Amino acid sequence: MSMTDVQPASSADAAQWLLASGADWWDLVRYGPPGFDAYVRVAFDPDPGEDPTGEDPGLRRALGVLATHTATPSIACAAIWEGWTSRQPPPPAPRVHIPHRTMLLFTGPVGVLRDAPALAWQEPGRSYQAPHLVWPADRAWCLACEVDEEIEFSVGCTDDAARALADAMPGAVRRVAYGEAAPMYRDP
């Protein structure tokens, strides 16, 4: 993978549907926009130390499943919090002005967007960081991974996609209502 796989979007227009939803910023960054048939919370691997990069294999599996539930797997967007790293200044990319979480917008195939933060900041090999919002061009689903969460991430999608996620990751997927309160941190 290279930076050519993940590019800054030409404008922030592809993210306007997120803001047009009228959702509270907190729900938006934790659940994506309202309006999907199903919402699921997917558990992060409790021991990401198995992968030397720190990548969560559940996120990789979820995006793999979701790629089969869109007509546009080669055209997708990733919104990444502009402050995710202090090592380098943010790359030039359109800004999506979500209150308290201004994000930078990038595009690429669904399969590479799991690596969007490191590729966008040109820090391959850096400890893994999940993208914060990911959706395909046809908006068939939206994956949301709030900056500070360490237990779960969310997916808004169709009922079929929710079942496929549950089948692919037994015990790691649970259905929820949009905006439902959920824990963010593991107990020490």
Image (cartoon, rainbow, N blue to C red):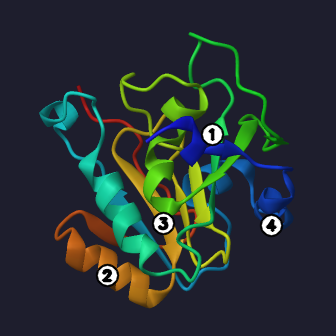
Task: Indicate the position of residue 7 as horizontal and vertical percent values.
Answer: 67, 44
> Outermost residue, left direction?
50
Front in this rendered view, residue 75 or 169: 75
Secondary structure beneath dot 4 equals helix
Q: Is residue 174 left or right of residue 85?
A: left
Q: Which residue is mark 1?
A: 80
- Whole-number angstrom distance, CA of label 2 to CA of label 3: 12 Å
The residue at the point 32 percent across, 70 percent down is 174
Secondary structure beneath dot 1 equals strand
- Whole-number angstrom distance, CA of label 2 to CA of label 1: 26 Å
Which label number is shown at residue 169? none
Location of the C terminus by quadrant is: top left
Q: Is residue 94 left or right of residue 54?
A: right
The residue at the point 27 percent across, 31 percent down is 54
**Mark closest to the chain's N terminus, 1 or 4:** 4
The residue at the point 49 percent across, 56 percent down is 181
Q: Which residue is mark 2?
A: 164
